[in-house]
Image: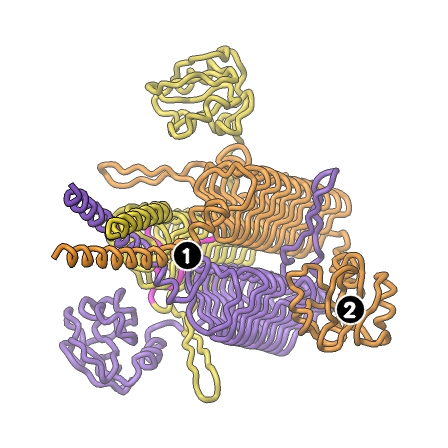
Chain colours: A purple, B orange, C yellow
Amino acid sequence: MRLSELAALVGGRLEGAAPPDAEITGVSSLHDALPGDVSFLANPKYAKQLASTKATAVLVREDCALPPPEAGGALLRVESPDLAFAKAVPLFTKPAIVRAPGIHPSAVVDPTAKLGRDVYVGPLAVIGPGAVVGDRCVIEAHAVVADEAVLGEECHLYPMVSIRERCRLGNRVTIHNGTVIGADGFGYNTKVGPDGIRVEKIPQLGNVEIGDDVEIGANAAIDRARFGSTVIGPHTKIDNLVQIAHNVRTGPYCGIVAQVGIAGSTHLGTGVMIWGQAGLAGHLEIGDRVEILAHAGVAGDLKEPGSYLGSPAVTKREAIRQFHVPRAVENLKADVAALKAQLKSLEDKLAQEGK
Amino acid sequence: MRLSELAALVGGRLEGAAPPDAEITGVSSLHDALPGDVSFLANPKYAKQLASTKATAVLVREDCALPPPEAGGALLRVESPDLAFAKAVPLFTKPAIVRAPGIHPSAVVDPTAKLGRDVYVGPLAVIGPGAVVGDRCVIEAHAVVADEAVLGEECHLYPMVSIRERCRLGNRVTIHNGTVIGADGFGYNTKVGPDGIRVEKIPQLGNVEIGDDVEIGANAAIDRARFGSTVIGPHTKIDNLVQIAHNVRTGPYCGIVAQVGIAGSTHLGTGVMIWGQAGLAGHLEIGDRVEILAHAGVAGDLKEPGSYLGSPAVTKREAIRQFHVPRAVENLKADVAALKAQLKSLEDKLAQEGK
Amino acid sequence: MRLSELAALVGGRLEGAAPPDAEITGVSSLHDALPGDVSFLANPKYAKQLASTKATAVLVREDCALPPPEAGGALLRVESPDLAFAKAVPLFTKPAIVRAPGIHPSAVVDPTAKLGRDVYVGPLAVIGPGAVVGDRCVIEAHAVVADEAVLGEECHLYPMVSIRERCRLGNRVTIHNGTVIGADGFGYNTKVGPDGIRVEKIPQLGNVEIGDDVEIGANAAIDRARFGSTVIGPHTKIDNLVQIAHNVRTGPYCGIVAQVGIAGSTHLGTGVMIWGQAGLAGHLEIGDRVEILAHAGVAGDLKEPGSYLGSPAVTKREAIRQFHVPRAVENLKADVAALKAQLKSLEDKLAQEGK
């Protein structure tokens, strides 16, 4: 595809060195781009990358004052670089793999399981006794849907996903490889008696209920409730290696980034955003639109919208105050040393005068 | 079941608004309860939830001064709300799935493997050459017991569990989906020479030995030893996504909560409790009954029983001191400003008098 | 084997109490050794363990001044205890399991997949349509090589590994159980409009490319790129439960320890070392030979070689300064109290004189 053809396709205006008949052969980020690539600048934060990119063309906003790339690429001015790039990407990338409906002969589907219409069950997948799989679901190789679990329509389980017994998924739930839905919560009663320690398991008799349009990454773990349900609200998106303990409830539209851990019975409101590796203690209430920054450790309720960080997590304002403590201490040291000297010189002067 | 019948069953005394013939249809936590549910209050810490619960009845201690729920539920006074609730739960929840002994025809059991009596091997499970599986074990769908691994009696491997070659489990060991026992430890020798960097793998020739009555959550990883064994002591309970490196040894009765990481050759004593996301450096000695709080980073030995927190982890007493540092700095700023003013005014006064 | 025979084998000189004909039956670390074991001391840091070891013999350096073990073991003086120990280990440990080439009849190999020579495909493994597997690869039980994925020569996939569609591995890549290569990156556009919130998935159309001689531990997750490739450089070693987000690039010879998380589009130079549980924000540049210590949280570029720690991560020098802040504050409190007293006494004295 020629650069001019791409410009026409995305409704853009060319600016800069690259000729309109330059060939476009791929898409890439500014940083990784090679000659022949089209890239994009949506966030002005990354404008410094524009100078050094090797991209042949870069999609930028109409109204953004920017010099063309030094390597001789063109700017391609559009209303929304994000949307224009999304149009360009499929031209240069292979389409996603699509599974045609059908049950692979090596899959083990229990005769008491109920499969909807146009379901795909891949090689060596297992659908257990009493399980229900909705229309147009895709159950890939090696996924296991255990006894009496229920999937809505158009769910997609990638290989090695486990849906444990009696868990329930809504419609359009996508779960990536290796994630476990419904393992037992971590609950024990420990008694120290005269004849030693006794650790008794608290039975975990509930399940997990996942709302519509949820996506969950790879190797995450969402535990079944002690009783009742661990609940993931609709449209909530969960990244890889996240731990969600028993009886947690998330609201709708939450985002939970990789390696976050949420302890038992904590509740998230609507649109809560939790960044990577943050941890939340148990039995907390996190209010609507709260944002918890990466690596934070949350030990108490967070009811006001806003951003929280640190461990224990505090408001951004308080965190900035804490951040400046080492500098403030250096300043105080200097002030105290000056005061000491000043007082000493005053005392010396008075002593002299007293003579 | 009527409320009065439930009261009789748990030997409890009714108090408050709900009529004795109210129907009880489920169990739930105070927070999640709906009308028809019975709930419980074991820990006075959560007493504030009592006012707002919608539960029809709440199990509470005989001697606890509490107002009945505002929503009109009853209190059900019993000696132990925990035990009474444990009695009530099975009445309203489905029993756990039980696997009848038998080998699924799709399982791949090596002819040289030895299976005990009354073993269940699920669909597509793999038992490798020379492996030994004790009586009454349950090996679920897609679990892999590799070459020469040994399981005691009544172990339960959930789907997608890997027991690597030559690892050994005691009796009554339960492991949840996706957990890997016995992958290679992370060990390399790096040499920087005139012809560049060379990274050589240190062979990991040991195994993992797991004691009796251990339970391990989902997607955890316990690495095999460089030589000898990585050891998990009996009655130790490990949560999801925990990392235990090569040659770690835990004592008996330890509790290791989700996403904890323990680096190589660290030893835990008896009854050590490590809360979520804490990390321990390698080659440490952690004494009996030490408690490491969530999100802590432990960089040195902890020999005295007690609670430790922070990163680097310190005693609770020291942590509280550190916690108050920002406030102390604010106070010091005020003090120093006052001293400056005071000294200035003194100097001014003396200067005036000197005139 | 006799102790004298072992000494001859490793070319060492015996010193201390154990008789030359003492029997050696195993290898172990100093800490875990029992009578009959040979152990080694490579790092003088652990010399204190020498006194209490029960090992019958300990390999130590020629020139190291050390008393023999108190329990009566011998020192065995050698040039390199590391190398000598590496020679001794195979004498007392079983050799690693080796897979003879061949396709297990239960494996599901798509007819359009291409397998090289002398490949092993274990029970119930899946090789998808259009996948390419190089010579002498070992694909263990339950591993899945998805559509159009490409493996070089001598790769080793342990059970339950997922290689997602179109990902590419170089030669001699080893991946341990449960690790997922190429799940979708975490990317969504969220729009808050008058009719509510809309969350749209950003298609993840790229792949993962892994260089030669890479090893990856258990239950890790390396996400496919939004477009282009997530890249793991040659000779890089990655531990268990590590999260590597979309479009990350690591240089060659990096080491990434357990539970580390690296957010999207961050680039690592050559020989970067990241210790356990550290987290790196997205879009960062980490320079050659940077070392990030355990539990650190990296929020900005780190271009200078050196060690960084803390959250937000700072240089070691700055971290030590911060570490001493609580002590400095205590000192300041004392200084300020002394100044107050001194000033008060001066004012009192002047007031008296004024009388």
Residue C176's x, y, as percent? 48, 49
**Considering depth in this image, is A81 or B204 the residue closer to the camera?**
A81
Q: Quadrant of the N terminus of chain A?
A: bottom left
In-image side of C328 versus B46 (left or right): left
In-image side of B305 versus B204 (left or right): right
- Residue B341 position by quadrant: bottom left
Residue C204 sits above or below residue B148 on the image: below
Residue C106's x, y, as percent? 60, 54
Q: Which residues are magenta?
A: C228-248
Residue A335 sits above or below residue A8 on the image: above
The amino acid type found where label 2 is placed reads Leu
- Does the magenta portion include C236? yes
Residue C338 sits above or below residue A94 on the image: above
Spatial separation of the CA atoms under disc 1 and disc 2: 48 Å
Magenta stretch mostly in which secondary structure?
A: loop
Say which element carries label 1.
strand
What's the residue at 69%, 69% (across, down)?
A: B50
Circle 1 or circle 2, nearest the eye: 2
Residue B150 visible: no
* The label number, if any, that marks residue B75 in the structure image: 2
